[in-house]
Image (cartoon, coloured by chain):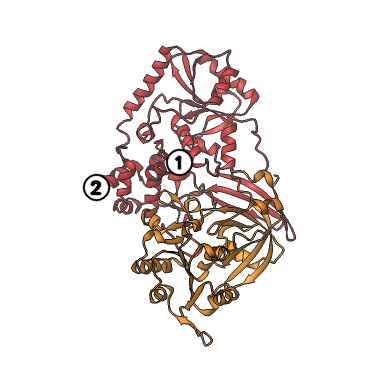
Chain colours: A red, B orange
Amino acid sequence: MKAYQLRAEDLAKLILRAAAEREVWAPVRRNDLTLFERITDPAQIDWEADNVRVPLRGLFLPVQEALFTFRKEGAEVTLAAPQDEPTLAGRLIIGARLCDAAALEYLDRAFGDPLADAPYRRRRERDLIVAVTCEKERPYCFCEVASEVLSRPRGADWLLTRVEDRLLVEVLSEKGERLAQSFSDLLSEADSQLLEAARAIRVAIAGRISNNARFSPEGLPARLMAAWDSPVWQSESERCLGCGICTFLCPSCQCFDICDRAGILGGERYRCYDTCQFASFTKMASGENPRPTQSERLRNRVLHKFAYSNERFGATACVGCGRCVYLCPVGIDIREVVEMATKEAVPVE
Amino acid sequence: MSEAARLVPAVDYVPYPARLEEVIPETSDIKTFRLRFLEETVAAAFAHKPGQFLTLSVFGEGEAPFCIASPASEREYLEISVKRVGKVTDALHELAPGTTVGIRGPYGNHFALDEARGKKLLVIGGGIGLAPLRALIYDAFEHRADYRDLWIIYGARSPGDLVYRRELDQWAQRDDCRLDLTVDKGDEEWKGHVGFVPQFLAELRPVSADTVAYTCGPPIMIKFVIQNLLQLGFAPEQIVTTLEMKMKCGVGKCGRCNIGPKYVCLDGPVFTYAELQSLPPEY
């Protein structure tokens, strides 16, 4: 794919021009958090913050969304599509971190064929994502070890890397190339010096966070499957509150529930986030539950991220953003759980 | 939202409207519901195979998955047999014929009857577990010459808990199949066998050679039926079961029905025992 350069001072111009055609969303400071919000002025963007609290996937798989509405008249029921979102032209989402973008690339697989998820796919086809290379790492970042996020940028349409007063624009998709065409007056071809400088920034971050993971990704799926009976699931889950924050704010978790909300005349069917950390997630009407305690539920979360997803989709479902690590109210750290569970286990041939 | 436009691979989770045509009481807590699509194009496109399931919407209460109990060749209507156990099933049991409901599907894999051609079929059901097997049994009746013996072993807690009573009588009179019934506990009128299905199976001693066994019922029954089939010499590949797991979306997206890397709604619900043995022990 192509690469361009953009003068740093022209970024605001580019954003304003994009905003004239479509909604532009970016990280915005809200009290002590940064969240994706619609902006009209590039000055609203919080470039300095840690990653957004609610990950990028929230813009593609909302916490809650109507699937359809229904009206009842006697025994008759009439269905209708939910009101169209006001963003039909497609949003430009700028300022996403590479971990969150890589998580979308995973979700593209999980929500893809066979039987692709229509609402998710519609937004993915419609929206444009401009990711940015992180300028500094955090102690909980382990993206490169978890999912080769820095060495294999993916999931976005553009990747911006700032090198002094220039920005490297790496085009990651065909949609991204069309976007570049529409700003051809602001972009010029990137020289090899700029490309090399941007690569060096990512290599340097990857090096600095290489010890953050605490576990080795080598042969991890098989080592984790061999740890099925490890006592670590029980011992580490004992202090779990079952709040589900590790999954609700995970950039690559996909689980949802489907429910009705209705009065006498009608209502709507909606879906909302659900989590494998709740007993109700797998408890059947008969009362049977294949994952009856927090121990089985912790094991499912970890194995889903690092083993099941690899077998099913050929990709690890953890991008190492660290949210579940620093947001867990009782300090359960997925990196330590993986390390402890696999330390003793020996994979069977 | 034209009906035809929605018959595409992408899933928008919008069900096809259908009319509840008939409610057939089976036992004190099980009813069979006969459903007919409102749109003919949908009815024509909805082609299921034995073992597949659908999701049924009771608008305002929600949606739940049910195996399709009617024969695949029956294209006029669909039937599901439902035990009253939760929110959606409670509401369904209260519905009057004529009510509009919603159907998505057909979902999941199916019984690989093609692979059983030329073999003997052994069908072992317990309670409402006969529902998915009923679709299989009718398929076998329709293509009876494709198989050798057809032997049905079915049981329930009591005579009153046996489902499809009128059909059981018909099957018993057929000379091209064998039906053996049992109940856990008889009553004054029950003249048949009394005992649990797995023990009854062990007493009947079906021959494993050239036989495929299909079983569905309560999890504890399936467990002991499989144990006894293995003792009778059945190989894990000759034992086929259909699993129950909590499901919502039916299309491998909502995340809850996984057993290890497999989704029961996509890769199942039908599994051979050999396949189950290769999965983590979480079912």
The amino acid marked with disc number 2 is Glu
Q: Is residue A126 left or right of residue A2?
A: right
Residue that carries the numbered disc 1 in the rendered image: A250
Residue A54 appears in the picture as rendered: no
The amino acid marked with disc number 1 is Cys
Q: Which mark is residue A344?
A: 2
The residue located at (45%, 78%) in the rendering is B184
Disc nearest the viewer among 2 and 1: 2
SS at circle 1: loop
For the N terminus of chain B, the image quarter is: top right
What residue occupies the far right of the structure in this picture? A73
SS at circle 2: helix
Q: Residues within 10 Å of mark 2 (few under 14, many from 20)?
A: few
Relative to B62, say whether A141 is above or below: above
Q: Chain of mark 1?
A: A
The picture quadrant where one finds residue A182 is: top right
Question: Which residue is nearer to you in this view: B187 or B71?
Answer: B71
Q: Chain of mark 2?
A: A
Relative to A347, say whether A265 is above or below: below
User: What distance separates the C-alpha of mark 2 from that of mark 1?
Assistant: 28 Å
Earlier residue among tags 2 and 1: 1
Relative to B98, say whether A132 is above or below: above
| Residue B147 image point, x, y percent | 50, 64
Q: Residues within 10 Å of mark 1 (few under 14, many from 20)?
A: many
| Residue A227 image point, x, y percent | 30, 49
The residue located at (61%, 31%) in the rendering is A90
The picture quadrant where one finds residue B168 is: bottom right
Relative to A328, say whether A157 is above or below: above
Residue B147 appears in the picture as rendered: yes
